[in-house]
Image: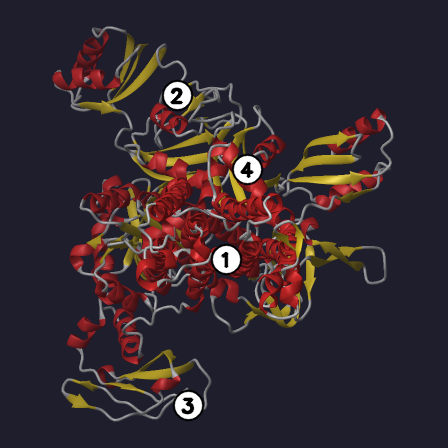
Amino acid sequence: GYPSAVWGEEQVSEVTLKVGGMTCGKCVKRVQKSLTEIAGVDGAEVDLEAGKAVVKGKDLDAASLAAVLTEAGYPSAIWGEDEAGEVILKVEGMTCGKCVKRVQKALAGIEGVEAAEVELEAGKAVVKGRGLVVTSLTASLTEAGYPSAVWSEQEEELLLVSPPGHSTKEIQTPMVSSAKLQAGSIQNVERSLFHVGGMTCSACVRQVESHITKIPGIISAEVSLLMNQAEVEWDKDSLDAEAIATHVRSIGYESRPLSTQADDECTLDVRGITCAACVGRIERGLGKAEGVLSASVSLAMNTAKIRYDKQVLGVRDLIKILDDIGYPASLREAESQESPKDIQAKESRRWRRRLAQAIAFTLPAFLIAMPLENVEPFESILMTKVFNGVTLQAVLLWALCTPVQFCIGSPFYSAAIKSLSHGSASMDVLVMLGTLAGYIYSCVTILIAAVNPNFEPTHYFEGSAFLITFVLLGRTLEASAKGEASDALSALMRLAPSTATVIVSDDSEKGYKEEEVRLEMLQVGDVIKVVSGGRVPCDGRCLKGTDSMIDESLVTGESAPVSKAPEDKVVGGSVVIDGYLKMKATRVGSDTFLAQVVKLVADAQASKAPIQLIADRIAGVFVPTIVAISVLTFTVWYTCCCFHLVPEEWILMGKPFLFSFLFGNAVLVVACPCALGLATPTAVMVGTGIGARLGILIKGGAVLETLHKVTAVALDKTGTLTLGQMTVSSAVIVSGSSESRVWTYLASAEQGSKHPIARAIGNHSATVQGCQTLPVSNVKSIAGKGLECEIDGVHVEVGKSSWIKSRTSDDGWKQLEDLEDHGHTTVYVAADGMVIGGLALADVVKDEAYEVIQNLKDAGIKVLMLTGDNRSTAISVANEVGIEDCNVTADVVPQLKSDEIERLQAEGHVVAMVGDGVNDSIALAKADIGIALGAGADVAVEAADVVLIHNNLNDVYTAMDLSRKTVRRIQWNYFWAMAYNLTAVPVAAGVLYPFTRTTIPPAVAGLAMAMSSVSVVLSSLCLRLYKPPALRGTGSKQRLRRAMGRVGRALGHESFGQYERAHEVVIEMGEPHLRAPKPTWVQWWFFPDENPLKVSAPGNRSNAKPKSYVFKGQRYRRLIPEC
């Protein structure tokens, strides 16, 4: 809404052009003359050797300048337009992972952008690509609601943005003003959670959302029925959290703001504050402490709210600072974060109390109204007339049922009245109308009997009481079932212990002491002790002295304990099975792996699936429609009775009004919009919970719904199809270069990098004699190609063979061509423009890759590989995992991966992208479904819609299968909810009465209505029986073929097929030990050229029967087994 541009764009500017065809001084003069004749050009400096021209002037159009020179015979282009560059932007307004994904998507749509890495905490985006235009980048982000500018330590200084190795014009770019926009960015945006109690159906959700969004200053609101929460984005300058809660309470729902305190904030209770001088002293004392960003002390509340840098100090340090200046402090008890199951349990207890109270009144009313009425002497007593035609039975029923109607049933009345007062109608309106109609009818007949002694009243008090009691029973069961639906999230929240044992140094003989602290008071750098049977409180690294076995099934999915040694990583929530763990905390609070998983699952369960819109639309008209049908039913029956169209024997007690009234009342109470409203959220909650239990984090109902529609899956190679554990298989040194020099440059350039190739180079260089690691400078990474840097005054380039060839002038690379013949990944290194060496690296294909791809193809899904590696390597891996050569795209940069995704989408495919690296982030964001492996880069995980914690490709197929089963369950829920209403309403209206002479009493109709909601929740809970699909082709033969393929590659062949054609091969599978527990290990023996090789692969007890395999038309005997 507020157009922006680079500062000074319309003032004096400078454009650098790349000019071709210049050969001498005359060419320079011709170029200068051509440029100076253009309007707006003040001057032009032409560099013959560099082949460039720097043009200065006003309102310069670079494209026009280049066109003029091209027409003059000197082909020109904007300098650096076709070369890779990097721009770092400062981005405001990002608050969560969703914001990161939106920023990445906004950047991915800009021409020339190849990769974008967004850092949430730093508030910046690193954009890599070709011909990047700063104004396009900032304008795109500003339009998306994230004001941005070029990153700078000081915003007032001039900023330089240029491709590597070239200078360009200086651009002065202040931050774009964060103006308030109706549908765009707001400067002071807050995202908060609010508890919303009392919602029962989609109509309630619709009403709350509609009301909140109408409040001035609200940006967006999303309400979750099952979580009893509303997530609201709002402008802090316009209103506060309590005002929002007050608005929600005004429409009849309980509401309060939930704690939204940031992870780098704390509130301390401070004792000893007596005056304003104390406040000033505390604030000054805290302000002097390193790491304290701000401190606000309240004299009235005796509290201090402090913002601090978690990496510098923690809560315990702040308490010590206050103690030192004479003000004892303690961490304020924050409102505990209740799990959804606890919330629903509390809701269930509340309804259970009301149900017990209702039964206490309704049961005696039932006895008085029915069985005792027909038993002497009770019949004569009950039929005794108290006043005129009013009997004792009527008085007792009125006395017993009135408290049920107006006291115990008051929640229905208050919610219904407030709902109607705001122009909407919920389930409570139907309950109120149905019960109140019966109660008022009964009261009217009693009053007539009191006036007319000859009138025989037909009261219906017990029917209204029954109805309220049955509805309370339904609400109680429904709340309990909802709690079971959220059991997965509750289980995750219980994994973290409430306290931790911290080891601190002191002056005792031991030199240390142990303190038990609350989990919220842990800080980075704490030394923590965990004994056998205890849970790890946070993420960290093992210290010296650790000797323990830890259950890390939360992360790995493997139940077998893992041995831990010093410097090994540990994850919060893991269990120490045996031994003693001493660790140093590296991530605490919301930064821990477990906290991030809990947040992802909670966000997913609170989100709406698009299919929920069906229920939302129906909910908007459901109640008015049912009321209209009820009135119509009464009118039709009563009219028929008045005109004697109904036989006299049909009419109950000979009273047409009562006869017609019971039909109309039954319609009111039998209809149930709750079942429709619960159909989707309960299934989504259970489905995402099952996914979390299986290590599949699905970010929302929309993702869960889309997953099963995927028709094409694109996979990255390194780290996705392969393990990413690369090793150097061979190296070639170009004539004239030394091995130590080549490896010194390689090790120095790749130091500090976490890429699999860099790790492989680092590991191998340690074994090379004379190799050393030197300081590097001017390091520039070129996304998808390589890097360049300065080492000891030498310009070194390391990267893909094709990239190095394009940047060097010699033909030394020809000596390295043999490296690419075996389908391995190749890396070349050049120094000062001369190729000096190269190496080949081999990777290992994941065990499950072949089976997963075959099962995806069997399901009719197109499978492709997108990789930046060379085509020979890509084809080799593709052949092993079963991907056709025509579906392999190699030598692609990140932007081309995104382009390939876009091409598939244009063909009508619903595309899922599976990747793990920074270079996959744009494609992950571009795809309909982005699937990231949990062991991958943080930016890839942020950009993805699904995260596979266990790093297992089987989970790709499982996620799609889970999506299919969940959506099918939602469809069944809708079917039963609609079938119930479409069947029950006509029956209650008396459509079948002429044929069957049976009716649905309103009390029974109320019970049916209550049970319909419970049945839908129980239907969703059936998803908890879900078991991951058994993939076709996961037996011993398939594992054998994979092992054979690895042997073939290890011996220098692209695949085992090529190896098999070159050698006579005999393969035998050994027998696992019959007593060995699962999983056992099966030994396979290979006999190439009479030299036996042996490969191990996991086997099962089911394969224990001795087997042999036929190859080359012959059967070979089984060898002696080894396990």
- Secondary structure beneath label 4: helix
Q: Is residue 347 left or right of residue 284?
A: left
Q: Amino acid at mark 2?
A: Gly
**Mark 1 sits on what residue?**
1003
Q: Is residue 328 left or right of residue 1109?
A: right
Q: Amino acid at mark 1?
A: Ala
Marks 2, 3: nearer the viewer: 2
Marks 4, 2: nearer the viewer: 4
**Mark 2 sits on what residue?**
1
Compute the Cα span from label 1 to label 2. Answer: 57 Å
Q: Is residue 630 left or right of residue 890?
A: right
Q: Which of these two is toward me, 1082 or 241?
A: 241
| Circle 1 residues within 10 Å: few <14, some 14–19, many ≥20 | many
Marks 1, 2: nearer the viewer: 1
| Circle 2 residues within 10 Å: few <14, some 14–19, many ≥20 | some
Q: Which of these two is toward me, 238 or 445?
A: 445
Q: Amino acid at mark 4?
A: Ile
Question: Residue 422's spot in the image, x, y percent?
Answer: 50, 32
**Mark 4 sits on what residue?**
417
First in sequence, mark 1 or 4: give its number.
4
Compute the Cα span from label 3 to label 4. Answer: 73 Å
Q: Residue at x 25, y 93 (%)?
A: 1117
First in sequence, mark 3 or 4: give its number.
4
Q: Which mark is residue 279?
A: none
